[in-house]
């Protein structure tokens, strides 16, 4: 019989990489695994429990919140607010930092999370995910501050995601490889099923929402044609797979090789930033991707080098095999001067500007 490794055992064994570790970090990862089990349970029975569907509220992006989003958001907060391991949290669903209630102790880590990503897929039974990231506190004082939240991704202490699909998996890294666990629902344990995940050299897939092609800048358009074998050296086309659920799209490409992209485009006045959030989505997945031998870029350089300017900052994202992502950067460098001229100042910390001082027309497409 093969060795059975529960996530608890694995996390505990990983502690040997950190001499002097007190176990706080280990316990924090346990808490996240437990939150994952609870969210998984609700996700699986959502249809029966009448939990699916939108609530009345709007989240900070003005999107309709789904009930399961709110459940996941609350569970993660409540699992972690009283343990004395965190000094603050931040969730994609809230404008501001979530403070630790004053009657509880605080600790030396901050947790950022997207409780249920891809929530537009909930009602149609498509895989969704939770994304989380942990930084060490860098400021003094008991409560965590914005400076603790807004750190470059290469300073992450750990990151991971949970995918609620045909099975529930938790994939995480603490900087020593990427490890995947599948939830065995009969015993309620995450068991090590994918030790030391490496993104395969042979790429299989590219993932992008093709319906936005009319909004892409020309470098991105040419890059996608190149992925299809229609431009440049005309290689074998990669398969196109796009679920519209970042965790699921990333997870597939991580295991099978490929690239995910959500570029900046011309859709709104700040279209050059893309849709996805640097802090809640891109940093964690970039970290995992790097740990698995891949690379993540905003089209200019390494996502992990970017220091966020604000909590809900969006970022263009190219994520997957290193050679594929470097090729995207090359296409953009050579073709997308217009986009770069808008994006680089923002990347360097300047406030976003509206083109020509006006709100840009929604339907503008590039040629
Ligand atoms: P969300 O955080 O509101 O759930 O949105 C993020 C999701 C990602 O999971 C997915 O990759 C992307 O939005 C899909 O966007 P689009 O429908 O524009 O392709
Ligand atoms: Mg999200």
Image: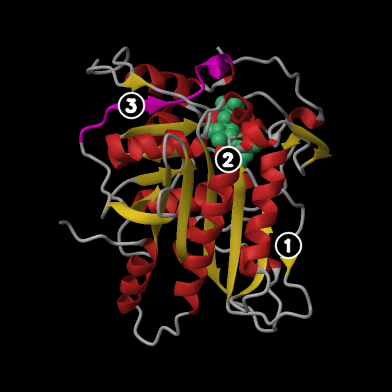
Residue 54 x, y percent position in the rendering: 75, 32
Cβ of mark 3 under 8 Å from ligand 1: the answer is no
| Quadrant observed for ligand 1 in the rendered image | top right
In the rendered image, the vertical position of residue 268 relative to residue 104, given as above or below: above
Q: Residue at x 27, y 43 (%)?
A: 199
Residue 147 x, y percent position in the rendering: 65, 69
Indicate the quadrant where residue 356 lies.
top right
Q: Determine the residue located farthest toward the front in the rendered image.
A: 186
- Provide the residue designation for mark 3: 205
Task: Report the side of 175 relative to 102 (left or right).
Answer: left
Q: What segment is highlighted magenta in the picture?
A: 202-214
- Provide the residue designation for mark 2: 43
Q: Indicate the secondary structure of the residue bearing disc 3.
A: strand
The magenta stretch spans residue 254: no
Closer to the chain start, of discs 3 and 2, is: 2
Q: Residues within 10 Å of mark 1 (few under 14, many from 20)?
A: some
In front here: 215 or 193? Answer: 193
- Nearer to us of marks 3 and 2 is 2
Q: CA distance from mark 3 to mark 2?
A: 27 Å
In the rendered image, the vertical position of residue 223 relative to residue 57, given as above or below: above
Q: Residue at x 64, y 33 (%)?
A: 48
Q: Determine the residue located farthest toward the right in the rendered image.
A: 56
Q: Residue at x 70, y 71 (%)?
A: 145
- Provide the residue designation for mark 1: 97
Task: Report the side of 151 relative to 1 (left or right).
Answer: right
In front here: 44 or 98? Answer: 44
Q: Indicate the secondary structure of the residue bearing disc 2.
A: helix
Residue 338 x, y percent position in the rendering: 57, 29
Residue 44 x, y percent position in the rendering: 55, 38
Q: CA distance from mark 1 to mark 3?
A: 37 Å
- State if disc 1 and disc 2 touch (CB < 8 Å): no
């Amino acid at each position: 019989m093969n060795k059975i490794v529960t996530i608890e055992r694995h996390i505990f064994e990983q502690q040997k990489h950190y001499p002097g570790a007190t176990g706080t970090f280990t316990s924090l990862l346990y808490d996240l695994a437990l939150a994952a089990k609870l969210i998984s349970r609700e996700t699986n029975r959502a249809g029966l429990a009448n939990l699916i569907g939108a609530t009345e509220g709007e989240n900070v992006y003005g999107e309709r919140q789904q009930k399961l989003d709110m459940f996941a958001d609350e569970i993660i907060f409540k699992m972690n607010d009283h343990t004395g391991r965190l000094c603050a949290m931040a969730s994609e669903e809230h404008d501001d930092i979530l403070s630790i209630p004053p009657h509880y102790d605080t600790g030396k880590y901050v947790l950022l999370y997207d409780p249920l990503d891809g929530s537009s897929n909930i009602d149609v039974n498509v895989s969704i995910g939770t994304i989380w990231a942990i930084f060490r506190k860098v400021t003094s004082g008991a409560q965590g501050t914005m400076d603790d939240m807004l750190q470059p991704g290469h300073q992450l202490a750990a990151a991971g995601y949970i995918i609620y699909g045909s099975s529930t998996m938790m994939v995480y890294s603490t900087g020593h490889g990427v490890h995947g666990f599948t939830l065995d629902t009969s015993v309620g344990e995450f068991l090590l099923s994918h030790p030391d995940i490496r993104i395969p050299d042979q790429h299989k897939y590219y993932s992008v929402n093709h319906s936005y092609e009319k909004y892409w800048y020309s470098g991105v358009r040419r890059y996608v044609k190149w992925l299809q074998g229609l431009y440049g050296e005309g290689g074998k086309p990669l398969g196109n797979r796009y679920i519209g659920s970042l965790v699921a799209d990333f997870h597939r490409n991580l295991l099978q090789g490929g690239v995910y992209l959500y570029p900046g485009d011309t859709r709104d006045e700040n279209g050059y930033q893309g849709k996805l959030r640097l802090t809640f989505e891109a940093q964690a997945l970039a970290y995992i991707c790097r740990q698995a031998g891949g690379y993540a870029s905003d089209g200019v350089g390494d996502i992990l080098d970017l220091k966020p300017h604000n909590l809900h900052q969006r970022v263009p994202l190219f994520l997957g095999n290193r050679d594929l992502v470097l090729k995207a950067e090359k296409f953009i460098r050579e073709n997308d001067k217009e986009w770069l001229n808008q994006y680089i100042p923002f990347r360097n910390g300047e406030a976003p500007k509206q083109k020509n001082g006006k709100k840009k027309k929604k339907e503008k497409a590039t040629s």
